């Protein structure tokens, strides 16, 4: 009897340590999805989803990779948002930059307003950016030339004005650049004519 008590007495600190380790692992594992979930909730608020098209983004279940619509994940991180044709009429929230691994962002055929966001230049994993047929205005930010992984940039059918920034020619992997049906002026950088799909 005393032997069993002695063994338990020795095992108890080890079991407590293991329990603490498990709790810490679970806490740290849920940090990233919480950040991304909160970012998406902030994004949805700013988008003015007046038609109520998105009902399953739940603030109390901040794990967008679990079951949220229009969201694609890989390794527990949001990599794609497909939000075309949802009737949004608000603006893009800076919270979107918290989606550190976002590779595809599709907002075409909505009624989003405001300037093209400069802060999108920080989303260096972006490969596909489609903001076609919205109400964005103002110039294309020079800083978007930092989006070195971008392959598709579609800004067709907005109210974008000013010159096409030369910095976009820094994006060597572009296979599609559609700037048609805007209010752009000035010359077109010669490098763009080598892009397979350029409008």
Image (cartoon, rainbow, N blue to C red):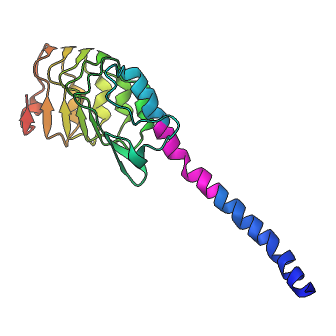
Q: Name the side, left or right, on which 196 lies relative to 80.
A: left
Residue at position x 23%, y 37% from top? 171
Using the rendered image of the protein, determine whether residue 162 is visible from the camera's viewpoint.
no
Is 26 inside the magenta-drawn segment?
A: yes
Query: In terms of depth relative to the viewer, which is nearer, 147 or 160?
Result: 160
Query: In terms of depth relative to the viewer, which is nearer, 83 or 187?
Result: 83
Q: Main secondary structure of the magenta part?
A: helix
Residue at position x 31%, y 28% from top? 53
Q: Residue 26, position in %: x, y?
A: 59, 55
Q: Name the side, left or right, on which 34 lies relative to 57.
A: right
- The quadrant in which the N terminus is found is bottom right
Q: Residue 94, position in %: x, y?
A: 42, 26
Query: In terms of depth relative to the viewer, which is nearer, 88 or 112?
Result: 88
Residue 156 found in image quarter: top left
Is 86 inside the magenta-drawn segment?
A: no
Query: In terms of depth relative to the viewer, which is nearer, 109 or 100?
Result: 109
User: What segment carries the magenta color?
Assistant: 24-37
Using the rendered image of the protein, determine whether residue 38 is visible from the camera's viewpoint.
yes
* Vertical arrangement, residue 190 with respect to residue 182, above or below: below
Q: Residue 28, position in %: x, y?
A: 59, 51
Residue at position x 50%, y 41% from top? 61
Residue at position x 14%, y 41% from top? 175
Residue 69 found in image quarter: top left
- The quadrant in which the C terminus is found is top left
């Amino acid at each position: 009897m005393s032997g069993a008590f002695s063994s338990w007495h020795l095992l108890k600190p080890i079991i407590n340590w293991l329990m603490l380790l498990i709790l810490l692992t679970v806490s740290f594992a849920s940090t990233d999805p919480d950040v991304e979930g909160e970012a998406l909730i902030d994004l949805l608020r700013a988008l003015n989803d007046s038609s109520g098209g998105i009902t399953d983004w739940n603030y109390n279940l901040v794990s967008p990779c679990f079951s949220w619509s229009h969201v694609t994940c890989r390794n527990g991180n949001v990599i794609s948002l497909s939000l075309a044709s949802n009737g949004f009429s608000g603006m893009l929230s800076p919270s979107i930059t918290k989606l550190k691994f976002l590779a595809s962002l599709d907002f075409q055929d909505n009624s989003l307003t405001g300037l093209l966001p400069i802060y999108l230049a920080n989303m260096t994993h972006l490969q596909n950016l489609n903001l076609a047929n919205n109400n964005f205005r103002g110039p294309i930010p020079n800083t978007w030339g930092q989006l070195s992984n971008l392959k598709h940039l579609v800004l067709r059918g907005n109210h974008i004005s000013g010159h096409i920034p030369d910095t976009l020619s820094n994006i060597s992997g572009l296979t599609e650049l559609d700037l048609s049906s805007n209010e752009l002026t000035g010359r077109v950088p010669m490098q763009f004519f080598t892009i397979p799909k350029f409008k």
